[in-house]
Image (spheres, helix red, strand yellow):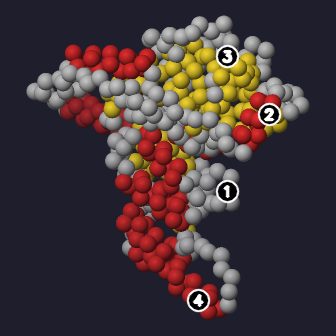
């Protein structure tokens, strides 16, 4: 039986569309699936600090702790348990994923209906953190607690409300971190005395993220690839731009969210392999990247066509793979109507083509007439041709390095040849004496 009151117990709630009901493959009936925690997602204010959970934080407790699934953390409403296998937990690319095989009880049946109706769409979990498993850091927007190791996972619970006050346990950690920084004088500008910490009272909060699970999986895939440098983040644009008929379109909203997650001052690499798509989404993404304070590098790794070629123009450095392609053309639309309607639409499209041409002209250095002719002809460029015509600055590092090595070897050979010539001249001079 769990001791009460339990020391150092904390709870966090993610209010999002990450809990759902689906048919169970293991048994007749249905199961409840979702994510109880999301990795690397910075929480809202938890009463003086914010919090993020790192991948691997649950590794030591999954499979060792006997975790229960309750409704609203009520021990009288047991939905599943890891020991008999009616609750299954795992870490995936998104966070802590759970599957619950609920019992055939009235309370469980009522909950399934509530989840299907989306009356209940929030998940909470109760936990304890290892003393050495957390890190406190003063960041730009305030204190952030990073959890790297949990010492105990008690339960996973679909919940009605997502409101829990910041716990005394977490606030004690915050006060300790603030006091340590104050004593050491870290973070204070030169010549300014460190100020004493101010202990704020415990405040209520709502950790409220309403993001569909599929969107979260897409988001994490968009923003979590390994960076080219330690200080450089990566956004991969590998799908159509804003296309409502595409399965996973890249939108300005998703890119804006990724940039917020990365941070305004960090350098970012944009990998592009996209056939293009919606003009206005492409323009919005282009402007978001141009406004980013860090250095932006765009790199075409396959195809940057139509609206995707516009995004490729947003880089402070524009790179292309040697085996890649870029395409520019005029705006496309689908029109139904008579000849007067078609003429009217053609005139309406002119300002959009002119706006695109202006970007291409400014970024490539070509004359407007030349660019408009390329757009009229729907022009395709290879990687080398894109550089030659000014639509890219350089080859990607993977293609540029062998050439650099070859150039270096040529330089060494040239120096050796010059040295041999000098020695021959010296021997000739000595023999003539």
**Would you name the residue on which mark 2 appears?**
109
Residue at disc 1, secondary structure: loop
Q: Which mark is residue 414?
A: none
Tell which tag, 1 or 3, sits nearer the viewer. 3
Which residue is found at the position 51% from the left and 25% from the top? 54
Q: Position of residue 202 (x, y in %)?
A: 39, 26
Which residue is found at the position 52% from the left and 82% from the top? 348
Residue 375 in the figure: left or right of residue 31: left
Which residue is found at the position 52% from the left and 39% from the top? 208
Pick whichever of labels 4 and 2 is earlier in the sequence. Answer: 2
Looking at the picture, tell me which residue is in the foreground, 336 or 85.
Answer: 85
Number of marks in the rendered image: 4
- In the rendered image, is residue 302 in sight? no
Looking at the picture, tell me which residue is in the foreground, 332 or 431.
Answer: 332
Pick whichever of labels 4 and 1 is earlier in the sequence. Answer: 1
Q: Are marks 1 and 3 in contact (CB under 8 Å)?
A: no
**Would you name the residue on which mark 1 appears?**
246
Q: Are marks 4 and 3 in contact (CB under 8 Å)?
A: no
Pick whichever of labels 2 and 3 is earlier in the sequence. Answer: 3
How far is the residue under mark 4 from the one under mark 3?
68 Å
Residue at disc 3, secondary structure: loop
How far is the residue under mark 2 from the one under mark 3?
21 Å
Query: Can you say which quadrant of the picture contains the N terminus?
Result: top right
Tell which tag, 2 or 1, sits nearer the viewer. 2
How far is the residue under mark 4 from the one under mark 1?
30 Å
**Would you name the residue on which mark 3 appears?**
67
Tell which tag, 4 or 3, sits nearer the viewer. 3
Looking at the picture, tell me which residue is in the foreground, 16 or 330.
Answer: 16
């Amino acid at each position: 039986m769990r001791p009460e009151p339990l020391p150092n117990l904390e709870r966090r709630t993610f209010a999002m569309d990450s809990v759902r009901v689906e048919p169970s493959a293991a048994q007749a009936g249905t199961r409840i699936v979702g994510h109880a925690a999301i990795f690397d997602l910075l929480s809202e204010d938890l009463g003086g600090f914010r919090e993020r959970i790192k991948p691997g934080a649950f590794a030591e407790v999954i499979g060792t702790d006997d975790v229960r699934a309750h409704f609203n953390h009520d021990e009288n409403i047991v939905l599943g348990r890891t020991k008999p296998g009616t609750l299954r937990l795992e870490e995936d690319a998104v966070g802590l994923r759970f599957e619950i095989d609920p019992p055939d009880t009235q309370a469980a049946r009522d909950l399934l209906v509530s989840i299907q109706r989306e009356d209940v769409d929030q998940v909470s979990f109760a936990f304890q953190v290892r003393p050495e498993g957390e890190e406190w850091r003063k960041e730009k927007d305030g204190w952030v607690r990073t959890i790297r190791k949990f010492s105990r996972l008690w339960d996973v619970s679909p919940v009605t409300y997502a409101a829990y006050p910041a716990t005394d346990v977490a606030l004690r950690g915050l006060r300790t971190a603030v006091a340590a920084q104050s004593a050491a004088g870290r973070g204070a500008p030169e010549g300014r005395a460190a100020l004493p910490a101010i202990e704020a009272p415990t405040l209520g909060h709502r950790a409220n993220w309403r993001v569909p699970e599929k969107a979260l999986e897409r988001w994490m895939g968009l923003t979590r690839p390994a960076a080219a440098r330690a200080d450089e983040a990566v956004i991969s644009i590998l799908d159509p731009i804003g296309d409502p008929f595409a399965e996973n379109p890249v939108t300005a909203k998703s890119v804006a969210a990724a940039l917020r997650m990365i941070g305004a001052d960090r350098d970012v690499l944009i990998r592009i392999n996209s056939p293009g798509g919606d003009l206005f989404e492409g323009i919005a993404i282009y402007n978001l990247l141009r406004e980013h304070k860090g250095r932006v590098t765009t790199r075409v790794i396959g195809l940057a066509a139509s609206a995707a070629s516009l995004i490729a123009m947003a880089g402070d450095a524009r790179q292309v793979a040697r085996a890649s392609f870029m395409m520019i053309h005029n705006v496309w639309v689908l029109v139904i109507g008579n000849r007067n309607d078609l003429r009217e639409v053609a005139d309406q499209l002119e300002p959009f083509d002119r706006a695109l041409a202006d970007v291409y002209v400014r970024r490539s250095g070509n004359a407007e007439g030349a660019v408009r002719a390329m757009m009229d002809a729907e022009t395709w460029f290879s990687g080398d041709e894109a550089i030659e015509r000014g639509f890219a600055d350089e080859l990607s590092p993977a293609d540029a390095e062998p050439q650099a090595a070859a150039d270096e070897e040529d330089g060494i050979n040239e120096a050796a040849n010059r040295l041999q010539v000098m020695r021959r001249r010296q021997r000739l001079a000595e023999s003539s004496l």
